[in-house]
Amino acid sequence: MRTAPRIAAILVLLCTPAWADSAGPAPKPGNGASARQNISGFFSHFPFEGGEAIYRGVCQGCHMPGAVGAMGAGAYPALARDGNLETGAYPVMIVLKGQKAMPGLGMQLDDQQVADVVNYVRSHFGNRFRDKVTAADVKAMR
């Protein structure tokens, strides 16, 4: 296995809490999650539905509950009251492609999931951005 895929896999595992522990509701049976693996077959699709469930199951492991961020082995920025989220395209690209220590999650999240989690973060944690990102917006940015 090449080094880059190993590092990416480790980062995803480190930034994702165990699904059964605190991730919110379990995946719904028959939601097609197992059929929605990415083309490489290396990463599977995250089974969470809805912005809050995706944040809790994927994002809060690094960005913390309340989106306050963390410092330690890495720097995980706070998303609470974050003016960088004003334009929806910015967080969409970060979620899809990653930045610095955050791995891109575009292969684990479908267009609707990306839109849902971006809209959730932009409208919670002291953020009050009202315009919505759509799945079509995310698809156009991939």
Image: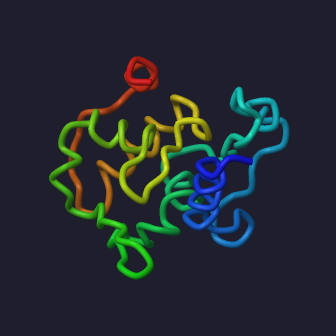
State the image coordinates of residue 53 (x, y, percent, origin top left). Answer: 57, 54
Q: Is residue 6 left or right of residue 70?
A: right
**20 and 6: which one is in front?**
6
Q: Position of residue 81 (x, y in %)?
A: 20, 62
Position of 70 compared to 131: left or right?
right
Name the residue at 70% across, 62% down: 19
* Picture coordinates of residue 9, whole percent (x, y): 65, 54
Decide: is 111 above or below 64. Answer: above
- Tell me which corner region of the image, top left, top right, bottom left or bottom right, holds residue 133: top left
Residue at 74%, 56% (x, y): give it.
26
Coloring applied to the structure: rainbow
Q: Residue at x 46, y 25 (%)?
A: 135
Viewer-closest of 42 and 21? 42
Give the residue displayed 30% in from the left and 50% down from the top.
123
Is residue 14 found left or right of 65 in the rendered image?
right
- As drawn, the residue found furthest toward the front would be 2
Pick the residue in front: 45 or 134. 45
From this view, report whether residue 105 is shown above or below residue 6: above
Q: Is residue 113 left or right of residue 96?
A: right
Work out whether 70 lies above or below 36. Answer: below
